[in-house]
Amino acid sequence: MILWIIGLLILIVLIFIVYYNRFVTLENRIDNSLSQIDVQLKKRSDLVPNLINSVKGYVKHERGVMTEVTKARKEFMGAKNFQSKVQKGAALQSAIGSLFAIAENYPQLKANENFLQLQQELAAIEDKVAYARQHYNDSILVYNNLTKRFPGVTFASIYRKSAKKYLEIPVEEKAVPKVSF
């Protein structure tokens, strides 16, 4: 009888340890996902000066766009929290899009090897940002499932864990681009 009680107590302690470790692992995965998004956004921001330098010689009279891209990058670099970085990153991406739209009017620029390479690098980084955002939201999904399903909900209340928010796309990025011919 005493062995059964000791075995049951050991089982209960192990269950508490397992659930605690699951919460820690999932929180670490979420933090890592956020960090990966931040790294990719920073890489994109670091490419902007090279992009501006490669375009500058071709589009001398397009100062407004160059200023807009530079300002957006500066604001992104000054963002203090992650949500602000996401918003400023969207503004930077929009400014870069304007720069690429102007570049369409300059055949020599579109054929420039440096410009093409930077364009490809930015596209690759955007893919990585999208993947990192997806990974973050997937991690949030697993964590939230653990905090809302039984018996995880019980352990979540014991460890004072609550559901986390998904990374949402800024309204500007949800807008359908207008295409006209």
Image (cartoon, rainbow, N blue to C red):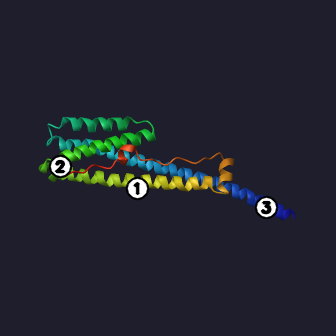
Residue 104 numbered tag: 2
149 over 50 or under it: above or below: below
Query: Residue 107's spot in the image, x, y percent?
Result: 12, 51
| Disc 1 to disc 3: CB gap under 8 Å | no
Quadrant in which residue 7 is drawn: bottom right
Residue annotated with mark 3: 8
Instruction: Tell me which residue sits at (41%, 46%) in the image.
Output: 38
- Residue type indicated by callout 1: Tyr
Dot 3 crowding, Cα within 10 Å, few <14, some 14–19, many 20+: few
Name the disc covering residue 131, or none. 1
Please state which amino acid type lies under the numbered disc 2. Answer: Glu
**Mark 3 to mark 2 CA distance (whole Å):** 71 Å
| Residue at (35, 55) in percent of width and height | 127
Callout 2: few (<14), some (14-19), or many (20+) C-alpha neighbours within 10 Å? few
Real-space Cα distance between discs 1 and 3? 44 Å
User: Could you say whether the residue bearing mark 2 is in a helix, strand or loop?
Assistant: loop
Q: Nearer the viewer, mark 1 or mark 2?
A: 2
**N-terminal of the two: label 1 or label 2?**
2
